[in-house]
Image (cartoon, helix red, strand yellow):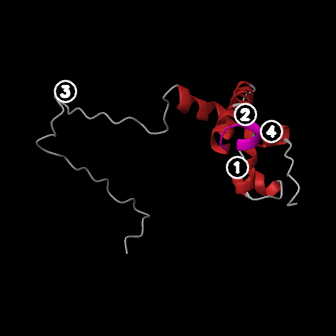
Amino acid sequence: MGRPEVEIDWSAVDKLLQIQCTGKEIASLLNMSYNTLERKCKKDHKRNFEDYSQEKRAGGLPSLRRRQWTKAMDGDSTMLIWLGKQYLEQTDKKQTDLTSSDGSMSPPDQIEIVAAPFPDDFDQG
């Protein structure tokens, strides 16, 4: 007779994939092995779970992007900075001018080192 066939709520699986859950996480939530999930996907959708999951995961990305964009436009400075780095090539690092005083890219012939004297109240010892 064998085991009864496992039924999977694919709409629930789709929602889990949209929030970027892995196949192993989904199988665990469904109380089954990943191999069972893979077999059912091949039977029910005529393709392996990896291909199925890539398609469904992609559906969650626009929602995430929209929420990030909304937070930034609402004034969240952290999100504004992050999006600026991603899309506007902004950076935290100060750009260093590599040209020497004569306008060339060659290193200078001499380097003048200037040291400030210790303040009178600085303990040197």
Report the residue at 86% width, 60% height from top: 3
Task: For the residues labelled 1 and 3, say whether their Cβ atoms are less than 8 Å apart.
Answer: no
Instruction: Report which residue position mark 4 lands on.
Output: 15
Residue type highlighted by circle 2: Gly
Element type where label 4 sits in the image: helix
Task: For the residues labelled 4 and 3, say whether their Cβ atoms are less than 8 Å apart.
Answer: no
Element type where label 1 sits in the image: helix
**Residue 103 — which label?**
3
- Return the disc, 2 or 3, that comes first in the chain's sequence: 2
Instruction: Report which residue position mark 2 lands on.
Output: 60
Instruction: Report which residue position mark 1 lands on.
Output: 38
Q: Position of residue 106 (x, y in %)?
A: 15, 36
Residue situated in front as seen by the camera: 18 or 30: 30
Indicate the quadrant where residue 99 lies. Answer: top left
Q: Residues within 10 Å of mark 4 (few under 14, many from 20)?
A: some
Q: Position of residue 31 (x, y in %)?
A: 83, 58
